[in-house]
Image (tube, coloured by chain):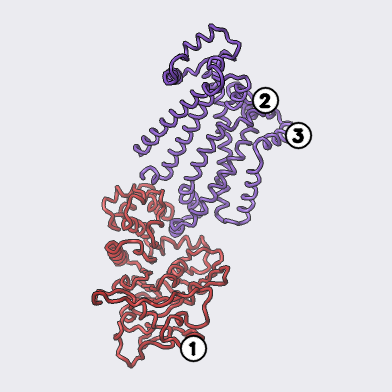
Chain colours: A purple, B red
Amino acid sequence: MARYVARRLATLVGIVFVISVGSFYLIHLLPGDPATVILGTGASPAARAALYRQLGLNRPLVAQYLVWIGHVLHGNLGVSFISQTPVLTTIRAAIPIDFELILISQVIAFAGAVPLAMRAARRPNGILDRILSAGSFTLLSIPPFIIIVLLVLLVSIKWGLANTGPSSYVSLGSDWIVNLESLALPSITLAVGSFVLYFRVLRADLITTLQEEFITMARSKGLRQRRIMWRHAFRPSSVALLGTAGVNIGGLLAGGFVVEYLLSIPGLGYTLIAAINSSDYLLVQGIVLVVSVGVVLINFLFDFLTSIVDPRISRE
Amino acid sequence: MSDQPLLSVRHLSTTFATPAGPLRAVDDVSFDLDAHETLGIVGESGSGKTVLARTLMGLQPRLNVEVTGSVQLAGHEVVGASTARLRELWSSEVAMVFQDPMTSLNPVMRVGRQIDEVLRVRHGMDRAAARARAIELLDLVGIPSAAQRYRAYPFELSGGMRQRVVIAIALAGQPRLLIADEPTTGLDVTIQAQILDLLDTLRAQLGMSVVMITHDLGVVATRTSRLLVMYAGRVAETGPTGDVFRHHRMPYTRALLESSPKLSNAPHTRLAAIPGQPPNLARVGPGCHFAPRCDLASDRCREVAPALEPTERPDHLFACWHPLRTPSETPGASS
C-alpha cells in the first residue's frame, strides 16, 4: 500500500509540474508583451519596469519560470492590476463557496443514487428499474442551464421562496440558513447530473456483481438480502463509481461556472468569467492553476479511496 | 443408520422457462441419504448435477424456475419453502462447498470476516467469540498460521487455501449435510487429493453426511458409499458404489467408466471418449436421452423412456431397455 501511494504521489508531482508550466506559459501565449498583457495598455513606464524586475521578464524563459514557480510555492500568485488585490486573496475567498456547493450536491447525488441503484439492480428490467432508468435518462438529457432556469422559475418566482433566486448569495459566515437557501437551487442542479451518472454506473456494476458466485455463496450462508446487498455486493461494485465520482467532481470544480454565473454566486467559476471579461490575466492564470491542481488532487484522492475499497488494486 | 434418512428426495424436477421452451434440467430424481453417509453424484458437464445440488438446498433462483416433487431435509420440506424458512436451514442444516474457490469468496472481504459473519449473524456469537471460532475453523481445515490468515484477502491465498476457507465457511454452522459441488475442479491434482481427504476426514470427525458432485469417477470411487449416475437430468443408474463400478447395467455408466483414465491401463492406451454431445435439454425426444449416443439403442429406446428398475439387489437400480448383463451372466467383465 505504501509503495502504491508513493508511486501515485510521484505521478502526481509530475502532473502538477506540467500544469504549472502550462499556466505559466498562458501569459506568453497571449499576443503582445507580457507586461502589457498583465498590466493593460495604460500602464505607466514605472509600473512596467517594476513588473519586469519582479518577474525577471528580460531573462530567459526557463529562468522566468523558476522565478514564477518560486513565488507560487510561497503563495504569491501576483497582485491583480485591475482590483489591486493579491490573486491568492481573491481565490481564497471563492474556494469555500465551490467546496460547499460541490459537497452539498454530492451528498444529494449519492444519497439518491446509491439506495435507488441498489433497489433497481435487485430486479433488472423490473418495473422500478425501468422507471428509474428512463427517468434518469430524461434528466441526463436536460442541460444544467435549463434545469437551473426551470428551478428558479418554479421555486423562486412561482412559489416565491425567498433567498433562492439570482444574486441572493450570502456567505456561510454571516447567516448559514440564508447561505444554505441561496445554494439550494445550484446544488440541486449540480446534483442532477451527478445523480444520473452515479445511478447508472452503480446499477450496471451491481447487476454484474449480483451474478457472481460469491453472492450465491453469501445466500447459502443464510444471510438476509439486505446484508448481502450492502456487505457483499456494494463494495465490489463501487470501484467504477468512485472513479466516475473523481472525474465528475473535478469536472464540477471547473464546470460549475454556469450555475454560479447565472445566479451570481461568487465562486471560482464566476470569478473566472469576471476575470476574463475584465482582462485580469494574473487572476485567470491563478484560477487555472488552482483549478487544475484541484482536479488532479481530487482524482488522486478518489484513486486512493478506490484502492482502499478494492485492496487488489494497490498490490498489483 | 437411523430410521428416517437425513435427506429424502422424491420425484424432484427442476424446469427452467427459456425462450426455446421449458428446459428440464433435473427430471424425476429420487434418492435417500442416511446420516453419516456419502453419496456421489456423477455425470458429464451439463447433466444437471449443479442444478440438482442447488435445488436440494433451495438455492436456485426463483424467477422462471419451476421445482416439483419433494426434498425432505432433516424433516423439513425444501421444495416450495419460503426464503425466510430456507435461511433457517442454510448453514445450520445444510451448507455448500462451491465449485470454484476463485469466484466463490468475496474478493474484497478478509477471509476471517467471511467466516465470522456466519457465526455472528446466524449463530449470535459476539465479535470476540466469532473471531476465536473462525481461527479454530481455519485451523481445522488445515490452514497454517490460521491467526494470520484470518486477516488475509482471498487474492493473497492459493487456490487450495481458498477452497479450505470455503470449506471452513460451510462448516461454521455445523451443518448435518454438506453438499460439495465439484469441490476440486479448479485445483491442480495434488491439491485435489488433499481437499478430498480433508472433506472425508471432516465428515467422519464431525458426523456429517456429504453429497459429492463430480464428473470424475476417480473422486467418488473410494470416498463414497453410494453413487447416483446422472445423464441429461435423469438418474441413469444408482446403487452402492462398488456395485455400480463392478456390476453396472446402464451403457452410459460403462461409457463413463471407460472414459476415465486408470492406473492399470497400459501406457499409451487410448481413452474411450463418449461419442457425440449431451443433448440440448430444451429439445429432447420422448425416449431415453442417451439413445442418440448409445450403440445398443433400438427404436424402443428412442420412443419410450425406461424407468428405474432394480437389479438383483434392491438398492441398485438402473434405467435401460438393453441392460449390459442379464443376472445369469458373470458380472465384472468390462471394466
Residue B322 % position (x, y): 41, 88
Residue B267 % position (x, y): 24, 74
Residue type beneath disc 1: Asp
Instruction: Residue A158: give its label.
Output: 3
Assign the N terminus of chain B to one quadrant of the image: bottom left
Q: Quadrant of residue A171?
A: top right
Disc 1 residue crowd, few under 14, some 14–19, many 20+, Cα 10 Å = few
Residue at the right extreme of this rendering: A158
- At a point 50% along the width and 38% down the height, the residue shown is A246
Disc 3 residue crowd, few under 14, some 14–19, many 20+, Cα 10 Å = few
Q: Residue under mark 3: which chain is it in? A: A
Tell me the residue that label 2 is attached to.
Answer: A168
Do tags 2 and 1 sit on the same chain?
A: no
Vertical placement of A285 versus B63: above or below?
A: above
Relative to residue B245, is residue A123 drawn left or right? right
Residue type beneath disc 2: Ser
Q: Residue under mark 1: which chain is it in? A: B
Q: CA distance from mark 2 to mark 3?
A: 17 Å
- At a point 63% along the width and 55% down the height, the residue shown is A127
Q: CA distance from mark 1 to mark 3?
A: 82 Å
Vertical placement of B240 versus A130: above or below?
A: below
Residue type beneath disc 3: Lys
Assign the C terminus of chain B to one quadrant of the image: bottom left
Vertical placement of B70 versus A153: above or below?
A: below
The disc, 2 or 3, on the residue closer to the chain's N-terminal end is: 3
Tell me the residue that label 1 is attached to.
Answer: B299
Do tags 1 and 3 sit on the same chain?
A: no
